[in-house]
Image (spheres, rainbow, N blue to C red):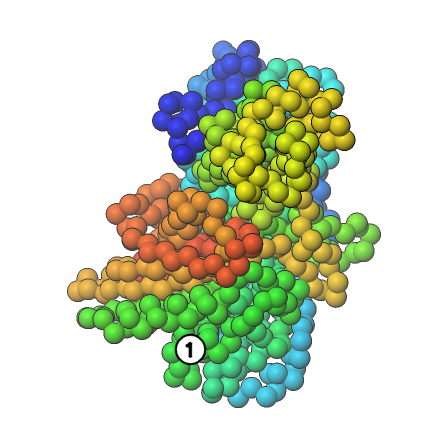
Amino acid sequence: MFKEGLRFVKGEGNYIDDFVLKEVKNYFSASIVRSPYAHAMIRSIDKSDAEKLNGVIKVITFNDIRNLLDPFPLSLDVNLDFYPMAKEKTLYYGEPVAVIIAKDDYVAEDAKELLQIDYEPLESIVSIENAINSGPIHPTLKSNVILDKTLVYGRFEYEIKKSPILIEERIRFPRYSSSPLETYEILARYNGEEYEIFSNFQGPFTIHYLLTKALKSKVVLKGPRDIGGSFGIKSAIYPYMALIAVASRVVKRPVKWVETRSEHITSSSVGAERESLIRIYGDKDGIINAIEMDLVDNLGAYPRPPEPGNLLRNHGNLTGAYDIKGLKVRYRAVLTNTVPTGLNRGYGGPHLYFALETVIDSFAREIGMDPIDVRLKNVFKKTPYETLTGGKYNGFSCYSVLKRMKEIYEKIEGEKRGKVGIGVSLVVEPSGTNIGYLDLARESKDYLPKSAAQDVVIVQIDPYGKVKVMVNGTNEGQGHETIISEIVSKRLGVNPDDVEVLYSVDTNRPWVVSSGSYSSRFTPIVVQALNNALDQLENRLLLAASEILGVQKSELKIENGRVRTISGNKSISVRHLIGTFYWDPAKLKGIEGGLVAVGYYQSPYADDIKEGKINSSISYGCMGHVVEVLMDETEIPRISRYVVVHDAGRILNENFARGQIIGSTFHGIEVSLYASLEYNEEGIPITQTFAEYGAMTAMESPKVEIEHLESDSNHLAGLGEGGTMAAPPAVFNAIRSLVEVKNIPLFLELTSKRK
């Protein structure tokens, strides 16, 4: 059964345009005029010719909306205003400068050519080094460095003094994107009291709070049942939600905006660029005593919330799978004249593990030890295990994953012929964000601490035996509706076809500030809330059967549409019990709540910051990659074998788990080999189309072998991002064993050497 797939095959997918065509009439179209400069003063904007074009309703600039907007709240204590549109100057290529409202998309696009804007170009700051050493791009700031925080854990000074081996490497992780099938799309309207915004975003979570503050109004957020992928990128849509919403208020009509593919590549959002300095302190026996990290993220022109989350989201798992006795980390975030950054699959994990796992290989080479054996020497052996930075590991075994990886590694090593390289990586995959990790960015103490890792699910069994499940989240291709139907069917004894899952965003329905589809939180949080609701309904059905059958509840079980005694001598159909609840509830005295249940879950593993420690995610799993790379006469490497071993506890649906692991692994391979978003010295994107941005195709995609391990069948963890984290270092380590390489994407470096 694949419920979502059946809908799509039947042409019954439900996207934004399906809603617009059915529900909204007489809306206007919007087109965004963007800055052609990375840094420039806006001297004047002449709207006259554009507004004379037949069909143009209005050209909106910042002056038209300045009294309707407040700046967005930020996650940092910095003195700058972040609006969805440029004010006196532009700070990155593609920053919105004006919005043209017209009767249709074509007129709105044509009017762009008639808008006359006088810019005065300014010097652009693009690189991290220039950002640190140059004056601030925001005049209200003293520096482009907006976060500089050093934290020390364990016996760091003692451990480095006793370590005879020091390995140090500087590593760059490039900006990278995701390419969902569907770009940003928004329809907004204002009714005089509140905004209603319909968009293909991943909320509602904290986006709702940011929008209510910026729009100075009540806001209702709604989303379609389906969105064409996201990978985190669509979390950054909210500035455009505010911009289109306020435009609808100005023109007093609903307004619709659809992002073009070129806009998406250059101006929507990217995963941050990072420069890492990693030092490993160890000994000749392969023991790593301490690690020192200096991590610098380029956040682009604005620290758009939840940034600087890319730096901090992996704080709890900063030492990965290893039992380290000393750690020092310096977090820095800088601003440049580039597109603002945000969520992207793995959010900070690819950056962390690319640096950590490649330096561990360098350490292994330095002491002449096999890279698997070095990892076996240092991996934590048992759970529960708490990291130096506060991460709480439970229910999975990196040691078991490594042992299986060693068997695969040795088999490939023994069979290899020709110029073959083998690379490995081992990552602890976080899932289910504890939003309190963002408090690490705060220096002042005048804020309330956060620890939300929660959700709410509503389940009703209706009088006809149909089960309705309501979740405030988005369908992005993970198969959540199908998995929910399978769980409900098994728990309540109904047919999966009789389960209807209402999986879409609507803040008119119950939701919490962490509701949404992101951070692989479905399994460790949403499923837990669902099970809490099903516990209530299952208990009521069993109590009802106990009353009617005259047996103890403990003697009953639900099975194949009936409630029967364990001995099997008595039974009653679930449909009969449902009918009794609705038609003859007097027979069920003392059973309260009927057949509607609200399931709420807040993870007990979510905590506040204490002494620089926080469990930044509430569940974890372990994933190991083993990669074989063949270098033929072309001197261009080809992946000839790819094996993934992982332990994420209980697998809810093996087909979907396999799809998520393969998809995330392909994403990670793409970043390691082909994809990066680069700028020239003037801050103009060099990669503006798929001709320049190296999106991987089916031709380059290797076969991925997957092995599931299950240390604890009660453990629930997400697994949709681990491949993105583990693939870049595994591929890099494999290729580096054959040729000298220093940066990713590797194909860019290898082909440039041949010129």
- Residue at position x 56%, y 20% in the image: 464
Residue 203 appears in view: no
Amino acid type of the residue that numbered disc 1 sits on in the rendered structure: Asp
> In which image quadrant can residue 386 be found?
bottom right
Query: Is residue 637 toward the left or the right of residue 476 in the image?
Result: left
Quadrant of the frame with the N terminus: top left
- Residue at position x 45%, y 77% in the image: 374
Coordinates of residue 588 in the picture (x, y in percent): 71, 27
Disc 1: CA contacts within 10 A as few (<14), some (14-19) or many (>=20): some
Query: Is residue 107 toward the left or the right of residue 43 in the image?
Result: left
Residue bearing mark 1: 373
Q: Secondary structure at mark 1?
A: helix
Residue at the farthest left position: 633
In this view, the residue in front, 443 or 201, is: 201
Query: Is residue 240 toward the left or the right of residue 212 in the image?
Result: left
Query: Is residue 371 toward the left or the right of residue 564 in the image?
Result: left
- Residue at position x 56%, y 54% in the image: 714
In this view, the residue in front, 347 or 259, is: 347
Residue 584 position (above or below residue 549)? above
Coordinates of residue 297 in the picture (x, y in percent): 56, 58
Quadrant of the frame with the C terminus: bottom left
